[in-house]
Amino acid sequence: MTRSLPPTRRLWLLGLALAAVSGAATAHGPTRQKVTETITINAPAATVWARIKDFAALQAWHPAVASSPADKGNEVGSVRQLTLKGGGALTETLEAWDDAGMKYTYRAKDGGALPVTNYTSTLRVTEDGGKATVEWRGAFYRGYPNNNPPPDQNDEAAVRAVTGVYQSGLANLKSLVEGK
């Protein structure tokens, strides 16, 4: 036997269902973006790791970085202040550092010179038959947190900027280590 709801109750439930559906259709903000870049370097992994493991020495191998002092070196919680050669700055915090695993992870809440927010990145070196594979992986949100971002702070701009940082850094690292 089926019980029927009073008309006012049916209208109320219908209104609630419509509100939920329409709210879900219009309520969308930024989605987490991800970038992963890898490069193979003709050198042992330990040699490459020795070149990049110092959290305070990004300027030693990344062509866009003028300086990158870190207040506590490779200690978790260390804060690195990046100054870029073309202008701009970034503040990053070391979240994990694993010398034996040849990797470290850092975070920047505010992207500073990059059109991103809540940026987390991991740099890892692995041995691959006498050569090193370097992976630089990041996850972040676009710089503009609301709907309809301006073109310079949308998802595409964020992905393009981070991809450019990773590609230029890895290409320069390869050139420095291989001596080319």
Image (cartoon, grey):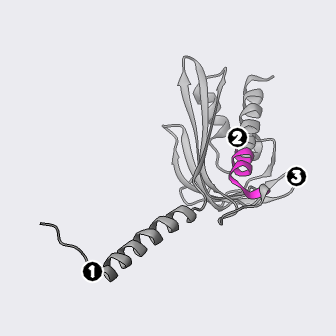
SS label for mark 1 = loop
Magenta segment, which residues? Answer: 152-163
Q: Which residue is mark 3?
A: 86
The kind of residue tagged 2 is Tyr
**Is the residue marked by circle 2 packed among few (<14), some (14-19), or many (20+) residues within 10 Å?**
many
- The earlier-in-sequence mark between 2 and 1 is 1
SS label for mark 3 = loop
Q: What residue is rendered at 73% in x and 59% in y? A: 90
In the foreground, 165 or 54: 165
The residues bearing labels 2 and 3 have C-alpha atoms spaced at a distance of: 16 Å
Q: Position of residue 99 (x, y in %)?
A: 52, 41
Query: Relative to residue 30, is residue 121 depicted above or below?
Result: above
Query: Relative to residue 15, is residue 41 depicted above or below?
Result: above
- The earlier-in-sequence mark between 2 and 3 is 3
**Is the residue marked by circle 3 packed among few (<14), some (14-19), or many (20+) residues within 10 Å?**
few
Is residue 156 a member of the stretch shown in magenta? yes
- The earlier-in-sequence mark between 3 and 1 is 1
**With 67 as the anchor, is 41 left or right in this view?**
left
Q: What residue is rendered at 45% in x and 69% in y? A: 18
Please identify the residue farthest to the top as the structure is shown: 129
In the foreground, 24 or 128: 24
The residues bearing labels 3 and 1 have C-alpha atoms spaced at a distance of: 69 Å
Q: Which mark is residue 6?
A: 1
Numbered disc in front, either 3 or 1: 1
Q: Position of residue 162 (x, y in %)?
A: 70, 46
Q: What residue is rendered at 75% in x and 31% in y? A: 171
Locate the N terminus by quadrant: bottom left
Q: Which mark is residue 166?
A: 2
The kind of residue tagged 1 is Pro
